[in-house]
């Protein structure tokens, strides 16, 4: 069994996903938010790529909640931003959340265009998503959303921490590329202190300057949830 | 002052090089070979991208030595391969070497298309190239040649080890991207044992299977030479 890492949404190609299980990672903050929302009783998250798509869904189904960000900020006409702390039980229980973010939802949509299972990963559910990915019996691709098409430290470090969880569960999984080896090494560096990876990243430093350190602390809670969101037919639900 | 990392020759863009000093790295084996040849008295290395270019130069100047590889193997009609151990004094002293390799010479040519100084780096001259790059007073871009357009562990780890040398010389140099931070972390992981980075890389594992472990041991000799090759006007000479 092999594991590989893709470093940005732009590098996702269907042939790299065929017959493999994908784990999509956008630690700051889309996939952390999705995991949190579903853990807090949200019925379904529908990832969409554009603001227009989200608004069109609201017009047809006024009971949905629109969430997301552009340039890290709330989108006009939306109910919620992209902070996981906004997606607590009182806001999302039993609801459908339509989510659009700069990097994360794009990576999910592109991963979903492949033929294999698509799991949503984060530090919050690192161990659970590793276990579930192994259960599929397929090779595993960790897809880092990246930041504006660039390599993202927090996503790659989280991929490495999930690789460490994979190795805790089985010794018979091997890296399929040098980037996979590098991610594993970064996982070893940051596993004892995932928050450091967030603060080492340029995106994390921007969020901290915007007063969003509480979001970062939330996103860095390793294995806080034992839950694996799965994306099927355009909808993300708990397996 | 900032430092940045480019992970493959394909990602080199002129605007990322403008006004900056480049350090080109192809640890296995092109830049290690260039450093070794010049340390052994070679007068000049001329990097070219194609076999045809190299053969055309030989026709005009029968005194040059042709070196390089395709698919890690000697090229028909060439004098030397891509092993640094072939470029010792008795073969190269006073000579011009025309070199073409799959990844390394392409990265050098593309870096040379930019406006800034282009230095040739390796583990063999990590400290020397770090010092020389700082002396230019410009921001620094570490250019990893990569392997067939993919991220290469040994090049990125070497970039990280050179970044560690930069930090030993000055505290006032900051990462310009998350990839630069990741490389720095990998440099910390591998600095005490650069050979491990070579063996962790898929390219290194292939060389080892081809019986080229002695090459790898040579390429992993950290700070063996105090020498900085510079590429100017299509020729690489010692500064």
Image (cartoon, coloured by chain):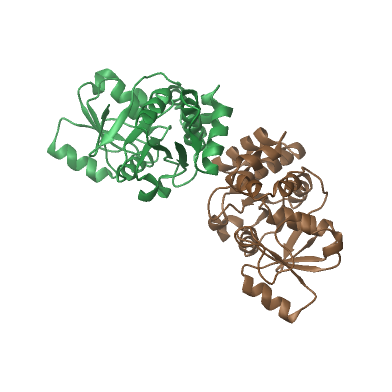
Chain colours: A green, B brown
Q: Residue B191, position in %: x, y?
A: 71, 36
Tell me, yes or no, if residue A61 can be seen here: yes
Furthest-bottom residue in this view: B60
* In this view, B144 is above or below A105: below
Q: Nearer the viewer, residue A109 or A92?
A: A109
Q: Residue furthest left?
A: A60
In the picture, measured across the screen, residue A174 lies left or right of residue A19, that is: right
Task: Kindly indicate the quadrant of the structure image that contains residue B202.
Answer: top right
Q: Is residue A13 in view?
A: no
Q: Is residue B69 above or below residue A72?
A: below
What quarter of the picture does the C terminus of chain B occupy? Answer: bottom right
Q: Quadrant of residue B112?
A: bottom right
* x, y percent for residue B13: 55, 59
Image position of B154 with respect to B36: above or below: above
B7 to A84, vertically: above or below: below
Q: Residue at x 74, y 58 (%)?
A: B34
Q: Position of residue A218 (x, y in %)?
A: 43, 22
Tell me where residue A100 appears, x and y as whole percent. 30, 39
- So how many labels did they put on this image? 0
Q: Locate the N terminus of chain B by quadrant.
A: top right
Q: Is residue B218 left or right of residue B145?
A: right
Q: Quadrant of residue B190?
A: top right
Q: Nearer the viewer, residue B209 or B13?
A: B209
């Amino acid at each position: 069994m092999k594991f590989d890492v893709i470093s940005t949404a732009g590098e996702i190609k269907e042939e790299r996903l065929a017959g493999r299980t994908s784990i999509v990672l956008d630690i700051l903050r889309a996939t952390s938010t999705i995991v949190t929302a579903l853990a807090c009783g949200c019925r379904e998250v529908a990832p969409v790529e554009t603001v227009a798509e989200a608004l069109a869904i609201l017009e047809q189904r006024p009971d949905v909640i629109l969430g997301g960000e552009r340039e890290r900020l709330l989108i006009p006409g939306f109910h919620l931003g992209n902070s996981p702390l906004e997606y607590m039980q009182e806001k999302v229980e039993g609801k459908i959340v339509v989510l659009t973010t700069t990097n994360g939802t794009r990576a999910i949509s592109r991963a979903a265009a492949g033929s294999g299972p698509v799991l949503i990963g984060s530090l919050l559910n690192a161990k659970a998503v590793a276990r579930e990915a192994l259960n599929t019996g397929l090779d595993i691709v960790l897809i880092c959303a990246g930041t504006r098409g660039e390599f993202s430290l927090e996503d790659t470090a989280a991929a490495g921490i999930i690789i460490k969880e994979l190795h805790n569960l089985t010794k018979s999984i091997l890296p399929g590329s040098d980037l996979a080896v590098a991610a594993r090494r970064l996982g070893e560096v940051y596993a004892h202190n995932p928050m450091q990876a967030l603060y080492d990243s340029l995106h994390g430093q921007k969020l901290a300057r915007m007063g969003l350190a509480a979001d970062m602390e939330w996103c860095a809670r390793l294995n806080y949830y034992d839950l694996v969101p799965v994306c099927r037919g355009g909808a993300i639900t708990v397996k």
